[in-house]
């Protein structure tokens, strides 16, 4: 047996720990984000992009290109030819969408994500796509843990100067989530906020240290996820778009593509989606949405938290309300009255607080080639959206005048079954 | 309440190694602080089974009292006489809690699961049943209540093995390794810890957390179009099979490394299993402490029993029956679901075929060279991967849910 001392055994371990320590505590930044990285990230839909701070900071402070956050969920993934990203790129407009969202991202996830990009929102513009499907009575926030990032929670805690009703509401919501509840460190801090107690200086010091470590981790790994969406989806789409940025020719082309891609079903659903996701269960799905109800949901309060963050940052926001595929809704028995009541509820929440930029497409789900599948906008739908998005973003930031009403955080609002009367009376 | 699961995150290793440091310093200077070791072990076991898992903690205590009395009583009996039926009875009683736990999910006995179930019951049962069998053989002569507890509750391996043997363990625990040997053990421990980090926290993470949900999702999506069969299923097979290895091998490396720090040479669980040249070779390399346990306490004993009672004339028949019985019992032990039992049967039949092939090869001088060896490794690997696809229950999800 070779005779070796303790240094031989533990020396390398010691060196490894020192190097790791240096890597995490070094006061300078270690990463370099290129234009191409940002471009790829803007259409990557990667969870790491939603969760991570580094790439978002780089994108929204980019000097050469004005990236505008597009908050939403699964509809953003439908990168077809008329998608806002394609149009902005093809016609070299003065903005580029940075898509933040995926199947499963809802208001609370967006609220936390906004905490680490406040400079990007402060007196700037944003687009927010609202899906009715978020506003379910039960089982909302199913995917919360997938998109949860401790770094965002720390950003939120750090930014609290005095505790607002929104902070208390968010704290209360976070404490329902296993990721926070089961972590003594976070549970303790969040419980203080929910109990209206400001964090001590000691807390702030620990947060700062933890923040530094997590931020470094984020910097080190934010470029790891590579997405090929730009090359695979965006560049090919450029060829199909008309040369002139003009609505009639866009609509013409959108109709042509939509027509060609919806041939195997009578719902106007894209062929591939129908073949893989619907066809085999189509009998079972008849009347399957009869019981769906979007009128009462915690999501209304989560959404309110998002609104108050926009107000706090004076963000100039355009809200896009997506329709549902009308033929599909009829087939699955979705209650029309309920649906429009829930749309009115959200619109009331928006307009009564001064959020007046609303592109409401809820009545257009029956238009041809407007929807790509059952609930997501496609071809003509994106062209219609562009009619609002383009002037809104090319004209640039307009000063805001929001007046937040914290009553929209309450159970009373969450559970209000909306009628014309009680909506206008709710104050 | 604080609940710490073994080897789950980096923090655990820091706490564990700090707690073990005094013990390691003692061993380095030629002293084994037995009492300290017991206290640290108990604290860690307590932290594993408290908080939301407190009922598992109670189950463990009840279980230990049961095994302790059983093994003690059988040792006392064995000193006076040696009736086969008493031995079978003692073995059955030793295995009973585990048998009940395994039947409980299939029979919907939720109260049995809550009352008797705790993480690691299988591995404790393997240890105590082996002690009963060796006591019958006469290789264990006395019952030492204190050493019995230290063996059964050896902290690094309590939840999932490796399965040590009593006599081997006692030899280590009552002595102190020489300094030279201990330093060599520490060197190995460092290597095993870091290899384990690579396996469990990097490779198993990439395979199990990043890739697996993705390929499973794609398989389930295409399942509706092609009656469950698609190319994606092959991806699931590789990803899930490799994940199984890196996750469990990583865990086993942690357990062995921790035991080395404590001056105990726990046996290794894996020895490059995917380089096995045939199925028998595979079982000498895969989850070794378990497969050797089954070999010594089930397979060999079945073979001897059948030979002694002269139930069959042919040795080949005897070993074939023993292979299938052995692997089926292993399948049942994994759980009473069709896919675990099918997995056991698959490997039982596989070993029978393997043996027949080896006999044929010997008789007919089948060519043997580097190329055939590589081919053998590739075939064995794929047979194993197919069996893992069965084992991991994804087919159940795909076909029946």
Image: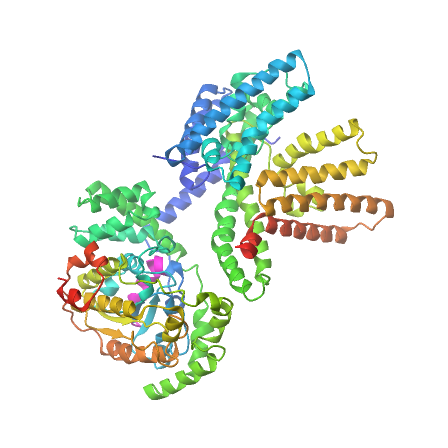
Q: Is residue A108 left or right of residue A236?
A: left
The magenta segment = A50-66
Q: Quadrant of the C terminus of chain A?
A: bottom left
Q: Which of the 4 image quadrants contains residue B291? A: top right
Q: Is residue A35 visible?
A: no
Magenta run includes residue A60: yes
Residue B67: image location, x then y, percent: 54, 23
Q: Is residue A336 visible?
A: yes
Instruction: Residue B134: name its quadrant.
Output: top right
Given residues B171 and A347, the one toward you in this image is A347
Nearest the eye: B334 or A249: B334
Residue A363 located within the stretch drawn in magenta:
no
Residue A7 on image: x %, y %: 49, 34
- The image's colouring method is rainbow
For this view, does B171 lie left or right of residue A139?
A: right
In the picture, the quarter occupied by the N terminus of chain A is top right
Name the spot of residue A413 as percent of width and height, x first: 20, 58
Given residues B195 and B297, the one toward you in this image is B297
| Residue B197 vertical placement versus B401 (above, below) | above
Nearest the viewer among A226 and B59 is: B59
Residue occupying the point 68% across, 37% down: B326
């Amino acid at each position: 047996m070779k005779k070796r001392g303790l240094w031989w055994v533990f020396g390398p371990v010691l060196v490894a720990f020192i190097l790791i320590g240096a890597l995490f505590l070094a006061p300078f930044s270690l990463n370099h984000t290129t234009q191409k990285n940002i471009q790829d990230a803007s259409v990557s839909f990667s969870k790491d992009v939603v969760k991570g701070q580094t790439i978002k900071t780089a994108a929204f402070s980019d000097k050469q290109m004005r990236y505008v956050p597009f908050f939403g969920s699964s509809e953003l993934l439908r990168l077809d030819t008329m998608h806002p990203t394609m149009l902005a790129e093809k016609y070299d407009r003065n903005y580029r969408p940075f898509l933040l969202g995926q199947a499963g991202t809802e208001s609370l996830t967006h609220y936390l994500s906004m905490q680490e990009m406040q400079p990007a929102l402060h007196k700037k513009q944003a687009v927010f796509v609202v899906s009715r499907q978020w506003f379910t009575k039960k089982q909302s926030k199913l995917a919360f843990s997938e998109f949860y990032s401790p770094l965002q929670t720390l950003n939120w805690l750090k930014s609290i100067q005095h505790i607002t009703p929104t902070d208390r509401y968010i704290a209360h919501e976070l404490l329902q989530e296993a990721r926070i509840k089961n972590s003594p460190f976070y549970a303790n801090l969040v419980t203080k906020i929910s109990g209206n107690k400001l964090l001590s200086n000691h807390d702030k010091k620990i947060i700062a240290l933890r923040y530094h470590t997590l931020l470094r981790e984020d910097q080190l790994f934010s470029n790891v996820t590579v997405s090929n969406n730009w090359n695979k989806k965006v560049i090919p789409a450029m060829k199909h778009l008309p040369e002139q940025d003009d609505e009639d020719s866009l609509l013409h082309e959108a109709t042509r593509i939509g027509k060609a891609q919806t041939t195997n079903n009578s719902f106007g659903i894209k062929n591939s989606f129908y073949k893989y996701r619907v066809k085999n269960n189509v009998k079972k799905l008849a009347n399957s949405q009869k019981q769906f109800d979007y009128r009462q949901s915690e999501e209304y309060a989560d959404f309110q938290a998002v609104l108050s963050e926009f107000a706090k940052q004076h963000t100039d926001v355009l809200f896009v309300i997506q329709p549902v595929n009308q033929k599909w809704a009829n087939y699955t028995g979705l209650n029309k009255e309920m649906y429009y009541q829930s749309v009115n509820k959200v619109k009331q929440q928006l307009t009564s607080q001064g959020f007046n930029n609303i592109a409401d497409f809820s009545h257009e789900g029956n238009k041809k080639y407007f929807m790509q599948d059952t609930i997501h906008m496609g071809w003509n739908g994106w062209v219609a959206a562009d009619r609002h998005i383009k002037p809104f973003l090319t004209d640039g930031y307009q000063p805001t005048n929001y007046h937040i009403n914290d009553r929209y955080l309450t159970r009373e609002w969450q559970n209000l079954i909306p009628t014309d009367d009680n909506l206008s009376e709710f104050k | 309440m604080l609940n710490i699961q073994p080897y789950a995150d980096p923090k655990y290793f820091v706490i564990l190694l700090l707690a073990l440091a005094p013990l390691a310093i003692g061993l380095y200077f030629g002293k084994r602080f037995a009492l300290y070791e017991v206290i640290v072990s108990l604290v860690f076991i307590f932290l594993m089974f408290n908080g939301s898992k407190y009922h598992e903690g109670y189950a463990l205590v009840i279980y230990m009292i049961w095994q302790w009395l059983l093994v003690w009583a059988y040792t006392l009996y064995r000193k006076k006489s040696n009736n086969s039926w008493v031995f079978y009875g003692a073995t059955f009683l030793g295995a009973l809690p585990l048998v009940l736990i395994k039947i409980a999910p299939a029979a919907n006995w939720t109260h049995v699961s809550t009352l008797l179930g705790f993480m690691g019951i299988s591995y404790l049962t393997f240890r105590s049943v082996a002690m009963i069998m060796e006591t019958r053989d006469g290789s264990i002569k006395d019952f030492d209540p204190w050493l019995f507890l230290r063996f059964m509750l050896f902290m690094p391996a309590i939840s999932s093995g490796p399965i040590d043997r009593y006599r081997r363990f006692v030899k280590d625990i009552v002595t102190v390794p020489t300094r030279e040997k201990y330093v060599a053990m520490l060197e190995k421990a460092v290597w095993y810890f870091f290899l384990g980090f690579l396996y469990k926290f990097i490779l198993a993470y990439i395979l199990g957390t990043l890739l697996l949900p993705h390929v499973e999702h794609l398989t389930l999506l295409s399942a509706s179009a092609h009656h469950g069969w698609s190319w994606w299923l092959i991806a699931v097979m590789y990803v899930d099979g490799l994940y199984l290895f890196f996750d469990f091998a990583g865990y086993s490396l942690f357990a062995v490394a921790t035991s080395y720090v404590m001056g105990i040479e726990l046996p290794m669980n894996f020895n490059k299993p995917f380089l096995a040249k045939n199925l028998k070779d595979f079982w000498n390399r895969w989850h070794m402490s378990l497969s050797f346990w089954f070999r010594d306490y089930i397979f060999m004993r079945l073979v001897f029993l059948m030979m002694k009672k002269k139930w069959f004339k042919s040795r080949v028949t005897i070993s074939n029956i023993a292979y299938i019985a052995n692997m089926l019992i292993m399948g049942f032990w994994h759980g009473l679901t069709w896919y675990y039992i099918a997995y056991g049967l698959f490997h039982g039949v596989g070993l029978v075929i393997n043996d027949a092939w080896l006999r044929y090869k010997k008789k007919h001088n089948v060519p043997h060279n580097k190329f055939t060896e590589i081919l053998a490794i590739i075939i064995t690997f794929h047979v194993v991967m197919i069996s893992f696809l069965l084992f991991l229950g994804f087919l159940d999800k795909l076909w029946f849910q």
